[in-house]
Image (tube, rainbow, N blue to C red):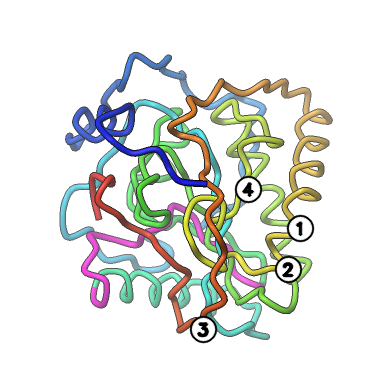
Amino acid sequence: MSHPRGPDRRTVLRGAALTTGATLLGGAALLGPASPAAAAPTVHARAAWGARPPSSPIQVLANPPLHIVVHHTATANSTDHSLEHALALSRSIQNHHMDSNGWSDAGQQLTISRGGHVMEGRDRTLPAVAAGQHVVGAHVANNNSTCIGIENEGTYTAQGPTQPLRDSLVETLAWLCAAYGLNPQTAILGHRDFNATACPGDVLYAMLPELRNTVSGVLRARGVEVSGRPVPEDLRPSYPDVPDAPWREFDHGPAHGPDDITR
């Protein structure tokens, strides 16, 4: 199945979003601040892990994202579940993305360690979520204007994540769905749903239906009603073939493409 291209809605997004402030794009409804029911997990902000400042201004869109994309980091399945390890992981990811990939900052908006610690990734992510806005990252090629990404520490091609990571992932997904008014059944996707990659690994990818159902149950228990917004056809996942290719550390597949507005 090919991904629609051309001067369509994504081009409109690209042209309208070149600003360092929040911009209303494509006539979509602007959400207000996050719902009080959008209970956030404990998220360690960038200052906690010693983030470097971005090398160029981070783009923030007034439109909320349409999708939450689950990734794995394609790193070792560490047995160190400490907070210190988690904060060091965030520094390593940012250094790799800035120094090796040449991006302006960490590509993903959020990171979860195998110990279940949640870290803010790209600059301005936490204020943007609280305001119902979207920080544009670099984690899913040609779809960064519509996708918020969660990097989950480890490689899940043959084994699953730890229970602390899974629990924190559920809480993080529920928080984002409530904050953005997203339906877990349609909004929670894997990287391979958009790009030709094995990310987030066969095992974690196979867990997505269960995660959607669990998050839906959490939202119902909290009294959060989300029906989700219709997604235009040209912004839906393209479900490309999944390659059987070797991975190297921090390489989870295509993260930036010509349709994206920033690095």
Question: Which of the two labelled residues, at mark 1 and mark 4, occupies the earlier sequence position?
Answer: 4
Q: Is residue 106 magenta?
A: yes
* Mark 4 Cα shell of 10 Å, populated few (<14), some (14-19), many (≥20): many
Give the residue at mark 3. 246
Question: Which residue corresponds to mark 4?
Answer: 172
Nearest-to-viewer mark from 2 and 4:
2
Disc 2 target residue: 203
Label 1 CA crowd tier, 10 Å (few <14, some 14–19, many 20+): few
Dot 3 or dot 4, earlier in sequence: 4
**Which numbered disc, 1 or 3, marks the residue closer to the eye?**
3
Q: Which residue is mark 1?
A: 207
Mark 3 to mark 2: distance in Å?
16 Å
User: What amino acid is found at the position of numbered circle 2 in the picture?
Assistant: Val
Which callout, 3 or 2, points at the residue further toward the start of the chain? 2
Report the Cα–Cα distance between label 3 and label 4.
Answer: 29 Å
Dot 2: few (<14), some (14–19), or many (≥20) neighbours within 10 Å? some
